[in-house]
Amino acid sequence: MVISTTVIGCTSAVIALGGFLFTRYREYKMDSTLLYKRISDLEAEQRLLKQQIDSMSKDQVLFETELKSVQNRLLDIDVKLSRILTLLEVKNEKH
C-alpha cells in the first residue's frame, strides 16, 4: 500500500512536471513563431522604406537640378530687366 501510494505520487509528479514542461515549450514555440513573423515583417518594411528613400533621393537630385535651372532663368530675367531699366532711364534723360 505504501509503495503504491509512492508510485502514484511520483507518477503524478512526473505527469505534472511533463505537463508544465510541455506548456512552457508550447509557449516558447508560439513566442518564437510570433517573433520570427514580426522580424520578417520588419525586414519587409525596411526594404520598402529603403526603396522609398532611394526614390526620394533621386527625386531630390532632380529637384535640385530643376531649381538650379530656375535660378539661372531668374538671373537672366534680372539681367534683362536691369538692361531695360537702364535703357528707360537713358531715354528718359534725353527727353
Image (spheres, rainbow, N blue to C red):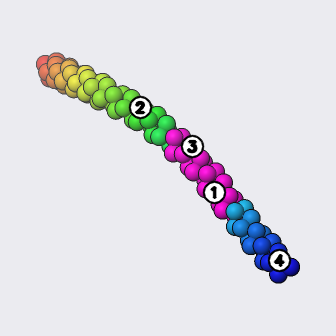
Q: Are the two marked residues, 4 and 1, in contact with CB atoms closer than 8 angstroms?
A: no
Q: Give the label on residue 37, or none.
A: 3
Q: What range is drawn magenta here?
A: 20-41
Task: Give the amino acid type for the residue marked by disc 3 in the picture.
Answer: Lys
Task: Give the spatial CA distance, label 4 vs label 1.
Answer: 30 Å
Q: Are the two marked residues, 3 and 1, in contact with CB atoms closer than 8 angstroms?
A: no
* Tag nearer the camera, 4 or 2: 4
Residue nearest the observer in this picture, 42 or 78: 42
* Tag nearer the camera, 4 or 1: 4
- Few, some or many C-alpha atoms within 10 Å of disc 4 (few <14, some 14-19, many ≥20)? few
* Tag nearer the camera, 1 or 2: 1
Q: Quadrant of residue 77?
A: top left
The answer to whether residue 78 is seen in the rendering is no
Q: Earlier in the sequence, mark 4 or mark 2?
A: 4
**Relative to 68, is 6 above or below?**
below
Q: Give the label on residue 25, or none.
A: 1
Q: Which secondary structure, mark 1?
A: helix
- Is-magenta flag for residue 40? yes
* Tag nearer the camera, 4 or 3: 4
Q: Earlier in the sequence, mark 1 or mark 2?
A: 1
Residue nearest the observer in this picture, 24 or 86: 24
